[in-house]
Amino acid sequence: MSHTQDTFVFDDDCGFCTWWAEFFDERTDLRIVGFSDLTPELRERLPENYEACSHLVTDEWVYSCGASIEEAFVRSDVAKPLRDGVLFLRNFEDYGRLREWGYRSVADHRAQWGQVVSKTPPVRRDREDDDSSSSDR
């Protein structure tokens, strides 16, 4: 198997999701890819209902939902000191359930969280660029 850059996959039509993706882009060496830019090879690695949450894809593993955010976060320059603690917590089933419950609680309220932190999603930036260029004609 060839080595590819570890990749964070996210909903690039969501302002809250875009904020997090850009946070990770600035603080990790992860490649950031939105759902609209998936290659067939990357899409094949994702679960069937991949649009239900974010994912972190490595050569060995696909982290999904809360696990993807957790893994991206502990790889960030601000959270590397927490990595050992997270690795320890992963030994407990209750931690995994709590992490996923927390992820789902936030994900299900993205619109509200987006009022606190949000960036214009790439998909909308592209649409705005198309709209402005067509009005210039």
Image: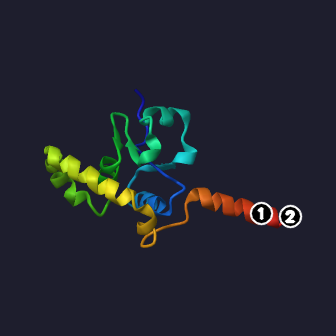
Identify the residue under disc 2: 137
The reply to whether callout 2 and callout 1 are in contact (CB within 8 Å) is yes
Q: Tell me: 17 left or right of 134.
A: left
The location of residue 134, given as percent across then percent down, is: 80, 61
Quarter of the image with the C terminus in it: bottom right
- On screen, 9 above or below 110? above
* Horizontal and vertical percent position of residue 103: 32, 55
Give, as a three-letter code, the residue at label 2.
Answer: Arg
Q: Which image quarter: residue 50? A: top left
Describe the element under mark 2 as helix, strand or loop.
loop
Q: Amino acid at mark 1?
A: Ser
Q: Residue furthest right?
A: 137
The image quadrant where one finds the N terminus is top left
The residue lying at 33 percent from left, 33 percent from top is 60
**Would you name the residue on which mark 1 appears?**
133
**124 lies left or right of 115:** right
Any part of residue 8 in sight: no
Question: Farthest top residue?
Answer: 1
